[in-house]
């Protein structure tokens, strides 16, 4: 899945866009895919896996 064409800087994000950081150096870019809550479905599932099956939003 290619997300880079949709990446945005923090100040360019709109409500309903995923805030998952996709790089570790400036300018910082965020996923910006359609999201319910803070993250898109893909990144929400990664977060749940990382937390051992628990999501506290």
Image (tube, rainbow, N blue to C red):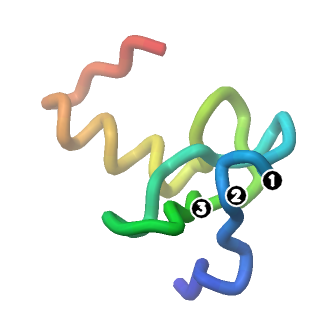
Which circle marks residue 31 in the picture? 3
Which circle marks residue 12 in the picture? 1
Q: Quadrant of residue 22?
A: bottom left
Helix, strand or loop under label 2: loop
Determine contact: label 1, label 2, CB under 8 Å. Answer: yes
Residue at left 81%, top 53%?
12
State how far apart marks 1 and 2 are (Cα).
9 Å
**Could you tell which of marks 1 and 2 lies nearer the N-terminus?**
1
In the figure, 17 relative to 23: above or below? above
Residue at left 50%, top 57%?
42
Compared across the picture, whether 24 is left or right of 50 comes to right
In the figure, 36 relative to 18: above or below? above
Which circle marks residue 38 in the picture? none
Q: Nearer the viewer, residue 50 or 4?
A: 4
Q: Nearer the viewer, residue 34 or 8?
A: 8
Compared across the picture, whether 43 is left or right of 3 comes to left
State how far apart marks 2 and 3 are (Cα).
4 Å
Which of label 3 and label 1 is nearer to you? 1
**Could you tell which of marks 3 and 1 lies nearer the N-terminus?**
1
Q: Quadrant of residue 55?
A: top left
Image spot of residue 28 (x, y percent): 50, 61
Determine contact: label 2, label 3, CB under 8 Å. Answer: yes
Helix, strand or loop under label 1: helix
Residue identifier under label 2: 32
Image spot of residue 7 (x, y percent): 66, 71
Residue at left 71%, top 43%?
35
Residue at left 27%, top 20%?
54
Image spot of residue 52 (x, y percent): 14, 30
Badge 2, how many Cα within 10 Å: few under 14, some, many 20+?
many
């Amino acid at each position: 899945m290619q997300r880079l064409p949709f990446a945005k800087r923090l100040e360019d994000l709109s409500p309903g866009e995923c805030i998952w950081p996709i790089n570790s150096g400036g300018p910082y870019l965020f996923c910006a895919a359609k999201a319910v809550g803070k993250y898109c479905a893909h990144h929400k599932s990664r977060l749940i896996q990382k937390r051992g099956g628990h999501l506290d939003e």
